[in-house]
Amino acid sequence: MRQESVLMVGSGGHARVLADILHLSNGLRLVGVIDDFEMAGTPALGVEILGTCEDLPRIMRQLECCRVVLAVGHNARRLDLAARIESLCNDVVWQSLLHPAAVLAGDAVVGEGAVIMAGAIVNAGAQIGRHCLINTSAIVEHDCKLGDGSSVGPGGVLGGNVRLGVGAIVALGAGVINALELGEHALLGAGATAVRDLPAYAVALGVPARTTRFRDAGEEYL
């Protein structure tokens, strides 16, 4: 079987998880790592760091490789990095990853660069946006619509018909009941349960979840 070459941006713990999914995926081969904070030539993920994002156009030409996956766990930074790379490389192809132990409904739609991890379930009619992250054992129920760059943390659950705005975050073990909407870059904290809509940039904690403050998209949450 012919294997497609893939470059990965990032080399930390999240990258190790994505590299494992890639190695388990038929038809994909990791050929190098891009990292703005490590030296070229440093071993990483079973290959080497080849350079920084600024070097990507040259690296892609040399390797005749245009497939890239972003190993960045922070939603806003992942979206910003995608935009930066697209400005450098107009022929980039964003590689999505689906762990073989995930369950994906036949009519679910998965956007470019999205990642669905082991044990995750994405049910009928769900739409997963570009660069979304569905973490280990997360559940996305029927007809949910996830905006670009949004994420569901490990063990998180979205009831049917939930809407997540661009960059919205459902953290580890959090849940959202049916037919609610979380605005862009809203954060539902770990273990919280949303029983009403959350406005954009809200931080909501507890059971039931209550908005405690509003956040900047770029602030730390991992």
Image (cartoon, rainbow, N blue to C red):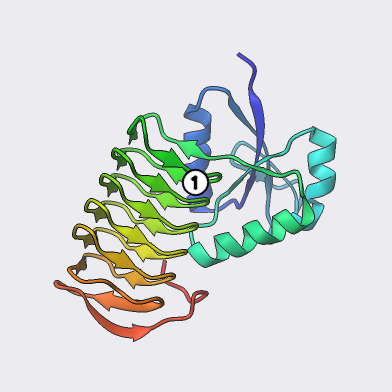
Left of 43 or right of it: where is 214? left
- The structure residue drawn at horizontal position 42% and vertical position 66%, both measured from the top left corner, is 222
- The structure residue drawn at horizontal position 42% and vertical position 48%, both measured from the top left corner, is 128
Furthest-bottom residue in this view = 213
Which sits in the foreground, 66 or 130?
130
Q: Secondary structure at mark 1?
A: loop
Q: Please provide percent x and percent y for residue 205.
A: 24, 75
Left of 164 or right of it: where is 44? right
Q: Please provide percent x and percent y for residue 37.
A: 68, 61
Label 1 CA crowd tier, 10 Å (few <14, some 14–19, many 20+): many
- The structure residue drawn at horizontal position 50% and vertical position 42%, both measured from the top left corner, is 18
Which sits in the foreground, 203 or 35?
203
Taking 104 as reference, is 11 above or below it?
below
Taking 97 as reference, is 199 above or below it?
below
**Tally of marks:** 1
- The structure residue drawn at horizontal position 79% and vertical position 57%, both measured from the top left corner, is 54
Q: Please provide percent x and percent y for residue 197.
A: 26, 71
Left of 49 or right of it: where is 111? left
Residue denoted by label 1:
114
Quadrant hosting residue 102: top left
Left of 70 or right of it: where is 220? left
Q: Please provide percent x and percent y for residue 147.
A: 44, 58
Q: Amino acid at mark 1?
A: Ala
Q: Quadrant of the N terminus?
A: top right
Quadrant hosting residue 95: top right
Furthest-left residue in this view = 207
